[in-house]
Image: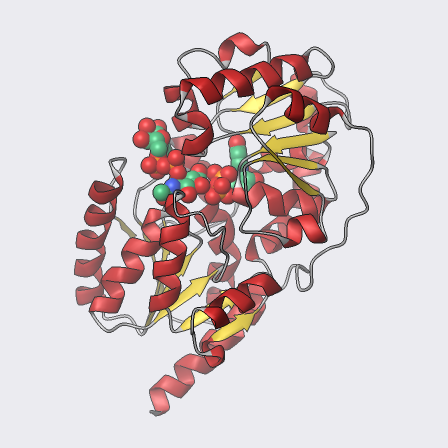
């Protein structure tokens, strides 16, 4: 039996096609939701819209400091692994749930598959970077989205036989749902024209937890909003730590959106301004200009092939990048073709057959 793990918004988007593929192959499977994200708009709506099965097990860990959250997940997940004795545990991405479950499984000598392995920002002030490095060291099957990841894993001494360049399951989800998302014409809700608005998301602690940076980012948004409508579905961390500054910027603040509404808005945006990992990739797949307010990216293919551009958190720089009229010719990165989960399913099934023989 396979156990797959989800815990946060990007996990749902990355794992939905993998779960569907395990079901298609009739591989016995249980889904564990750690409860790291729990608000209806950060969790339930994704299960509904992405057609995911309800979790078999819900740990309900909720929010906390890094150590608290990681420890709670490990304690809960260790018990599940002891009861269920899975043949393999599948984790995705780079959040605390990913690393905590990988660590608990590894200590019980259970094999681990990591979806979205090998990405590196080389910035250990980001909690995600620590989660990535630890998870990849523990994994037995490493599924990479882009070529840079293969190089990083090789440099870190990981056996190449464990590593597979499969493409991007988040882009599988995009392919599956794009038409449905566009059919909803979500821009009408905001009374804006397709191609004539900016869509914003910020949630990295480096951007949203400090008053000076929030002030600067809100100043940038206010200047952009003076030129084109700006829609900002706000992450709970960003709202909680904003001290009211976002609300004063004159942009359209709304609660976090469901996947379909957000995807539809993203696909017809003039520009997307973000610090999200996944949104950098989705805008590249959609050919929509993306201004990423970060000093680095663990997803360099979105810059070398795609539509992504890094900008420092200074209002003038963000405004200039967002309102530029240059068009970028984007290429779709290799294997971002909507079939990554099928490749993952085939590799896992073969691996399970090999494990059963030995
Ligand atoms: C987490 C991930 C981050 C990922 C992001 C995706 C870690 C270390 N961080 O960041 O890598 O990019 O998810 O969105 O794993 N909150 C709610 N409702 C929720 C969830 C959170 O209100 O459903 C609020 C709580 O006040 C909480 C805060 O948001 O303290 C932060 O949540 P947390 O899961 O710790 O980190 P994220 O910032 O969401
Ligand atoms: N997303 C969404 N609604 C929103 C904001 C983002 O559905 O209001 C989706 C987005 O399209 C992508 C995923 O959530 O599929 C990215 O999650 P997030 O930015 O929270 O995490 P990260 O990718 O930075 O880890």
Where residue 166 appears, as percent x and y from the top left, is 58, 67
Figure disc tally: 0
Residue at 54% from the left image edge and 16% from the top image edge: 218
Q: Is residue 62 left or right of residue 263?
A: left
Image quarter in which the C terminus is found: bottom left
Report the side of 260 relative to 85 (left or right): right
Q: For residue 336, which quarter of the picture?
A: bottom right
Q: Is residue 274 left or right of residue 284?
A: left
Left or right side of 205 for 268: right
Task: Provide residue 68's location: percent of width, then percent of height.
Answer: 20, 41
Write down the quadrant of residue 37 in the picture: top left
Q: Is residue 316 visible?
A: yes
Picture layout, residue 111 above or below residue 175: below
Looking at the figure, which quarter contains the N terminus? bottom left
Q: How is the image coloured?
A: secondary structure
- The answer to whether residue 175 is seen in the rendering is no
Q: Residue furthest bottom?
A: 357
Residue 174 % position (x, y)? 63, 48
Q: Position of residue 141 (x, y in %)?
A: 43, 72
Image vertical order of residue 195 relative to residue 260, above or below: above
Q: Observer-nearest residue: 191 or 229?
A: 229
Q: Residue at x 73, y 39 (%)?
A: 288
**Residue at x-position 82% and y-position 34%:** 326
Foreground of the two, 83 or 234: 234
């Amino acid at each position: 039996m396979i156990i797959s793990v989800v815990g946060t918004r990007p996990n749902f988007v990355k794992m939905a096609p993998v779960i569907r593929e395990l079901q298609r192959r009739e591989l016995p499977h249980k889904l564990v939701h750690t409860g790291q994200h729990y608000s209806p708009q950060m969790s339930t709506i994704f299960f509904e819209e992405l057609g995911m099965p309800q979790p078999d097990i819900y740990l309900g860990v909720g929010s906390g400091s890094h150590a608290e959250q990681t420890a709670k997940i490990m304690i809960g997940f260790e018990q599940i692994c002891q009861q269920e004795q899975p043949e393999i545990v599948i984790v995705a991405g780079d959040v605390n749930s990913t690393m905590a479950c990988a660590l608990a499984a590894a200590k019980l000598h259970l094999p681990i598959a990591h979806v979205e392995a090998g990405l590196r920002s080389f910035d250990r002030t980001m909690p995600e970077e620590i989660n990535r490095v630890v998870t990849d060291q523990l994994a037995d099957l490493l599924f990479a989205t882009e070529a840079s990841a293969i190089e990083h894993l090789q440099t870190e001494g990981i056996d190449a036989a464990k590593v597979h360049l499969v493409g991007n399951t988040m882009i599988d989800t995009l392919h599956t749902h794009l038409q449905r998302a566009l059919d909803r014409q979500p821009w009408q809700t905001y009374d804006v024209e397709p191609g004539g608005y900016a869509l914003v998301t910020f949630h990295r602690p480096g951007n949203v937890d400090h008053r000076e940076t929030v002030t600067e980012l809100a100043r940038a948004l206010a200047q952009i909003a003076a030129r084109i409508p700006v829609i900002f579905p706000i992450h709970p961390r960003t709202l909680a730590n904003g001290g009211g500054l976002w609300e004063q910027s004159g942009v359209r603040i709304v609660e976090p959106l469901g996947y379909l509404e957000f995807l539809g808005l993203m696909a017809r945006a003039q520009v997307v301004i973000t610090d999200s990992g996944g949104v950098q990739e989705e805008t590249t797949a959609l050919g929509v200009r993306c201004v990423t307010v970060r000093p680095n990216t663990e997803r360099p293919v979105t810059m070398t092939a795609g539509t992504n551009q890094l900008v420092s958190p200074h209002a003038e720089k963000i405004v200039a990048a967002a309102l530029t009229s240059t068009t970028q010719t984007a290429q779709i990165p290799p294997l971002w073709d909507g079939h990554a989960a099928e490749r993952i399913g085939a590799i896992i099934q073969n691996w399970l057959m090999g494990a059963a023989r030995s």
